Image (cartoon, grey):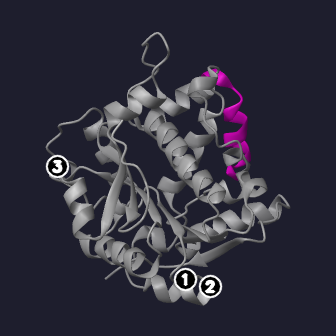
């Protein structure tokens, strides 16, 4: 069986998402401005020039991003940032980024970290690309940030993490951003089983997923056709989804309590709606975001 493209070069989708996060920092309205002020350091020189040329940037965004994806990435970044900061402030022992891509949180929030170990897991090609940029720009990684190369479909997460210094039975946060839809159902189950069995009660996981109907090409949601075609063309096609309305039962069966579940309309209301009710932009309708805790943990359920 031939290797997936992501195994032989850095992830194209990770690069697109990084560019989207950088573009979001140029929004004029602070309510709708992206928080990832370090994303642009990972851009190639030409992309950085485009970032500061407003007409060119907006034209490129219309070309690159299917409808509602840039808005979704903006909202997702804020949700995941909040989960990351909450874990730091609660003095979680560990934060594990499952499929980190070109994540900058360990850098952006280094001044808030008071001893939490941050493990960034991803395929070696993507990590090598990011580390090269940081080396070239002479940006040191924080001492508590550990890069861990892994093939999620073939390697055991616990074995790989343990070798890197992960300690079981500690209160931990797992950020699983933009990953589940690229995995098999078995790989998703294996990951959740690892978290449930090896993290302390009260540990949390934040992840996003797509609706299963998207895989069946039912075209129910805003921007669905365009995003499906775009992803398929990268060679990193989607393989996993959940039926609409089944997330809570899915989690309970695997030993988790649902804390928060954000659908596209809820993301629009929370992150893209002005005080006067004006909608800044629509969110692509294919994705939802979840925050859950390992059974026995704390966390007030939030369906807002």
The residue tagged 3 is 213
Give whichever of 175, 130 is nearer the camera.
175
Name the N-terminal-most of marks 2 and 3.
2
* Residue at the image position 81 percent from the left and 62 percent from the top: 136
Judge by depth and name the residue closer to the eye, 25 or 158: 158
Residue under the image location 55 percent in, 63 percent down: 100
Farthest residue, direction right:
138
- Label 2 sits on a secondary structure element that is helix
Q: Quadrant of the N terminus?
A: bottom left
Q: Nearer the viewer, residue 229 or 114?
A: 114
The disc at residue 164 is 2
In the rendered view, tell whether residue 77 sits above or below residue 294. above
Left/right placement of residue 23 relative to residue 143 reads left
Question: Is residue 150 positioned above or below 70 on the image?
Answer: below
Residue 140 sits above or below residue 281 on the image: below
Give the magenta range.
42-55
Can you see residue 297? Answer: yes
Q: Are marks 2 and 1 in contact (CB under 8 Å)?
A: yes
Q: Between residues 283 and 265, which one lies in front from this camera angle?
A: 265
Tell me whether the residue at label 1 lies in contact with that at label 3, contact meaning CB atoms closer than 8 angstroms: no
User: In whole angstroms, how far apart are the C-alphas of marks 1 and 3?
Assistant: 33 Å
Residue in the picture at 39% in, 77% down? 3
Calculate the distance from the C-alpha at mark 2 to the C-alpha at mark 1: 5 Å
The x and y percentages for residue 23 are 61, 35
Tell whether position 53 is magenta. yes
Q: Give the numbered dot on residue 161.
A: 1
Q: Is residue 260 magenta?
A: no
Mark 3: secondary structure? helix
Could you tell me which quadrant the C terminus lies in? Answer: top left
Residue 301 placement (x, y as % from top left): 36, 48
């Amino acid at each position: 069986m031939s290797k997936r493209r992501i195994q032989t070069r850095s992830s194209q989708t990770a690069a697109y998402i990084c560019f989207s996060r950088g573009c979001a920092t140029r929004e004029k309205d602070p309510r709708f401005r992206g928080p990832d002020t370090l994303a642009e350091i990972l851009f190639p020189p030409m992309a950085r020039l485009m970032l500061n040329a407003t007409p060119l940037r907006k034209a490129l965004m219309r070309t690159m991003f299917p409808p509602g994806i840039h808005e979704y990435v903006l909202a997702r970044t804020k949700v995941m940032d909040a989960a990351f900061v909450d874990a730091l402030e609660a003095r979680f022992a560990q934060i594990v980024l499952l499929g980190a891509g070109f994540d900058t949180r360990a850098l952006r929030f280094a001044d808030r970290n008071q001893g939490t170990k941050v493990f960034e897991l991803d395929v070696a090609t993507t990590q090598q690309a990011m580390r090269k940029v940081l080396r070239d720009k002479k940006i040191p990684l924080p001492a508590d940030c550990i890069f861990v190369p892994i093939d999620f479909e073939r390697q055991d997460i616990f074995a790989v993490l343990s070798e890197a210094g992960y300690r079981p039975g500690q209160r931990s946060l797992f950020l699983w951003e933009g990953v589940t839809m690229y995995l098999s159902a078995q790989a998703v189950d294996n990951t959740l089983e690892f978290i449930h069995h090896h993290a302390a009660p009260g540990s949390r996981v934040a992840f996003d997923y797509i609706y299963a109907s998207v895989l069946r090409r039912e075209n129910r949601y805003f921007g669905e056709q365009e995003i499906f075609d775009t992803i398929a063309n990268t060679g990193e096609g989607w393989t996993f989804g959940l039926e609409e309305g089944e997330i809570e039962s899915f989690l309970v069966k695997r030993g988790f309590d649902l804390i928060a579940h954000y659908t596209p309309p809820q993301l629009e209301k929370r992150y893209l709606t002005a005080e006067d009710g004006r909608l800044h932009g629509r969110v692509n309708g294919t994705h939802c975001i979840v925050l859950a805790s390992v059974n026995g943990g704390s966390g007030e359920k939030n369906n807002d």
